[in-house]
Amino acid sequence: MKGTTPVYPAAYIPYGTWGGSWFPAWHTSALAEVDIARFAAEAMPLILSKRKVQITELDYLISGSTIPWLYKFWGSPYLSHSFGQRLPGFHVEQACATGLQAVLKANAHVQGGSHQTVGVLTFDKTSNSPAGVFPNQGTYRRTEVISDIWDNFGYDPSTGQSGFSQPKGETSMIACAGRCARKYKLDFNEIAELSFYRYQQYFEAKDTGVLDRYLIPMKVLDVRGQVIGEVNDDNGIRRYHSLEQFKSERQLDTGVAAGGQTHASDGMFTMLVTTEGRAKELSPQPEISIQLVASNEFRTLTGHMPDAPALAVIQLLERTGLSMDDMTAVYDHNPFAINDAVFAQLLNYDWHKMNDTGCPMVYGHPQGPTLVRVIVEALEKTVDRGGGYTLVFGCAAGDVGIAAIFKVTDSRGGN
């Protein structure tokens, strides 16, 4: 097959050297009270130590987040200082694509030979996000005040004309989902069925302990070092008991109901990218090899964000010569159930075969770490199935879709 040679042949992801916090919903955990960047930095060596990897193995750090945090100007060097290592590095931000972009950049740095073991640290906190005041000579008010989370989720400047000239309800994220539902003539009964199925997938994985492989319970400390809480669950998820519950929910826009969209949450996730030799040394299962095959981005029509991931995947498959039949595991970042319904239609793919152990639509959406958690879940499922190709994709603000294919090889007898 053409194009299936890894784009960064010298870079490897050591299996199992990853993990993160649970994603508690907005204001449902002690994470709402702390500096999320410092928390994530201090959690990273804890997670790696549980994988028998010392933080001293890293020689570079790529961090990623989307919501302003204290001392953000100092980026990755400050974060590495917070966990006791003075590493070089930089910070990545691309809305909900941030996590995957950070992993892609880590692969590129290892391939280039500038660094051998690159840590990826992603995080975000929607609770208590800061508000900013901006001098703006382009408006009559001269000053704009923006609440980073709610104003950006409630207003899309690409679909507006200037400032806040249009009602927020006409330019919000929900509007782009409803617009795609109408464009692709999606039936709400299918959206409800899809949504209910996604919740079933998540709770089956949780109830059987699958999520415990990579979600680490963490104590949250105040400035005195006193425990103020523990993050040990994806708080805030409603457990639906019947399809009829979904069908009875009021549509907020065409095809969009409360249970069929994600929610604001807090959390962090981390993983490593390194050389082939170091991957074998660091991984608890060195027989498993993971490499990035290819990636792609696509920008769709204004105000149609939910179809961008599918269009990114279509281009990616064309370029690599692979098909959906070649994929062992398919996972996505789906802020709306509509994303998956559009993908299924455009790729002629059964949405029942996606997101076997959960998805952000159900467990929440802290932007920065979301796609790293998705990558980890997808790679774990691929390993469980003996190896093969892993497809990960998602959308981002600005009507952007991002997608990547990884290859998992298991020398114990898998693919």
Image (spheres, grey):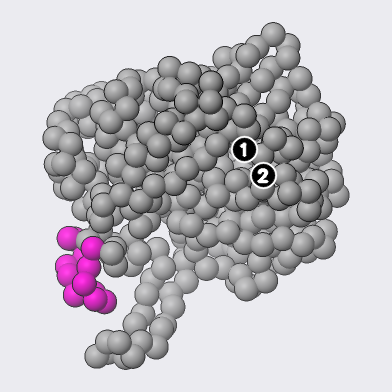
**Image vertical order of residue 87 relative to residue 166, above or below:** above
Q: Residue at x 33, y 90 (%)?
A: 137
**Residue behind mark 1:** 7
> Of the residues shown, which amino acid type is indicated by label 2?
Asn
Give the left or right position of residue 87, taking residue 303 as reference: right
Crowding at mark 2 (Cα within 10 Å: few <14, some 14-19, many 20+)? many
Q: Is residue 374 located in the magenta-colored stretch of the structure?
A: no
Q: Answer whether residue 177 is visible to the viewer in this image.
A: yes
Give the left or right position of residue 142, taking residue 382 as reference: left
Quick one: 271 or 44, which is closer to the camera?
Answer: 271
Quarter of the rendering occupied by the C terminus: top right
Q: Which residues are magenta?
A: 159-170
Counting from the top left corner in percent of width and height, residue 215 is at 60, 36
Q: Quadrant of residue 382?
A: top right
**Image vertical order of residue 111 relative to residue 399, above or below:** above
Counting from the top left corner in percent of width and height, residue 197 is at 33, 24
Whether label 2 touches label 1, CB < 8 Å: yes
**Residue behind mark 2:** 107
The CA span between labels 2 and 1 is 9 Å
Crowding at mark 1 (Cα within 10 Å: few <14, some 14-19, many 20+)? some
